[in-house]
Image: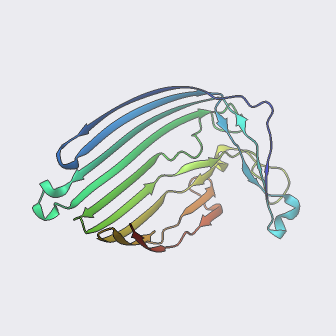
Amino acid sequence: MEIQLANPDLRAVRGTNLDLGVAWQGPGGLHLALSGFAKRLARYLNDTGNDLNNPDAVMQYRAVRLIRPENGGTATILGLEASAAVPLGGVARVLRHVALAGDLTMLHSAVRLNNPALDRVERTQYAPASNLLLRLHYDDGRISADAACRLTGAYIQEYGIEVPTFAGTTPLSGSALDTWVRPSRQIDLAVARQWGTHTLRLALRNALNDTAYRATIGRTSDAVPQTILGGRQVLLTWTAGF
């Protein structure tokens, strides 16, 4: 069960943003882009929600999740984004229908929550330190194929505020009890055949059957793990135009 609590003292976040980017478009679809950004936030907003197990119901495997948004100090976020699309026909003629593309995001954050139970500097919630997408594409006008790989770094989901103990009713707090989502990987494959206005497409998502989501209390521990197995998905679609 999830209970969302209101906070009448909540205030709007104030932010100062600086963004700078450059892009270059070359021949044959070549594309390169690089950008950076910096953000300074005051009255940083975090939900501080935690999986607070009801001590009276732990043995029955029931839990109550409380979510109450809080303003917490300041945050500084620095980021770098890069993207590229490179046709490989210039390397060898046999690769004239093949292109390689990639997108990379790097993120550094420092949050000062002014909470005596936590470290002086934390990271922002739900913000992976890195996110990489690589894509290999083939298209000769009749047949197209894609292979894509996404790598997502670890990130904090919830701060370690009032984490319950299973031996008693007194909760614990501390940055060592932050809930971390582990790094993840997903590989997708697809191939399509076109006949005039008709297209038949076969796609395989999560080809290696990687874990979709895994979170633990502590960045490197296996305490109280939460795991979601997304499994493989096979999609066959037929598109017709009239």
Callout count:
0
User: 38 or 188: nearer the eye?
Assistant: 188
Q: Position of residue 197 (x, y in %)?
A: 33, 67
Residue displayed at 60% across by 66% down: 228
Q: Position of residue 196 (x, y in %)?
A: 29, 69
Residue displayed at 49% across by 56% down: 183
Q: In this view, which residue lies farthest toward the left?
A: 93
Q: Quadrant of the N terminus?
A: bottom right
Left or right of 75? Residue 92 is left
Q: Position of residue 60 (x, y in %)?
A: 83, 69
User: 45 or 142: nearer the eye?
Assistant: 142
Residue displayed at 69% across by 46% down: 160
Q: Quadrant of the C terminus?
A: bottom left
Left or right of 190? Residue 6 is right
Measured along the vertical axis of the image, is residue 68 above or below residue 200?
above
User: 141 or 59: nearer the eye?
Assistant: 141
Left or right of 143? Residue 42 is right
Residue displayed at 49% across by 73% down: 232
Q: Is residue 183 visible?
A: yes
Q: Position of residue 190 (x, y in %)?
A: 37, 69
Measured along the vertical axis of the image, is residue 209 above or below residue 117?
below
Judging from the image, the colouring scheme is rainbow
